[in-house]
Image (cartoon, rainbow, N blue to C red):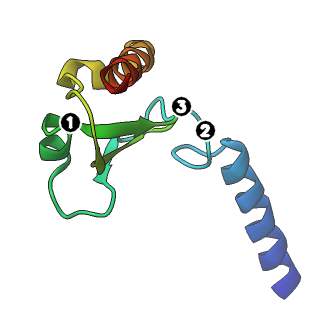
Amino acid sequence: MKYLGLATLALMTGCAGAGLMPGGGAGGGGGAIKEFMVIGSSMPFEQCRAAGGLIIRDVGSPMTACDPSVKRNPVPQAALDDPLTDTDLNAALEQQDLDAVN
């Protein structure tokens, strides 16, 4: 009986890791709840974004992070909803930062 429980647990873990279970795994985040966090600070995400904190997001992940220790031009709120626009916008902001230094 103990082995049956362990086998079931291993099977469920494998399914969750492959994204086969609803709401589980490293899947795309299509139906997942969006999460916003600030790295190393207790300030709200929106305050960090408005202050020009670095926005960090992986493709397919529902989590978006903001690093307040890296300052740049603020990312518009609307850009956080579209991953393609966000990627292009971050590249443009990075170029602005490089141009300002040089």
Task: Please name the amino acid that badge 2 sits on.
Answer: Gly
Residue 7: name its quadrant.
bottom right
State the quadrant of the C terminus: top left
- From this viewpoint, which residue is outermost toward the front? 102
Q: Residues within 10 Å of mark 3 (few under 14, many from 20)?
A: few
Question: Which is in the foreground here, disc 1 or disc 3?
Answer: 1
- The residue indicated by pointer 1 is 52
Disc 2 + disc 3, Cβ < 8 Å: yes
Residue at horizontal 34 percent and vertical 25 percent from the top? 97
For disc 2, the marked residue is 27
Give the secondary structure at mark 1. loop
User: Which residue has dot 3 on it?
Assistant: 60
Vertical relation: 90 (above or below) 21:
above
Q: Nearer the viewer, residue 24 or 59?
A: 59
Residue drawn at point x = 28 percent, y = 19 percent: 79
| x and y, in percent, of residue 19 in the image | 66, 42
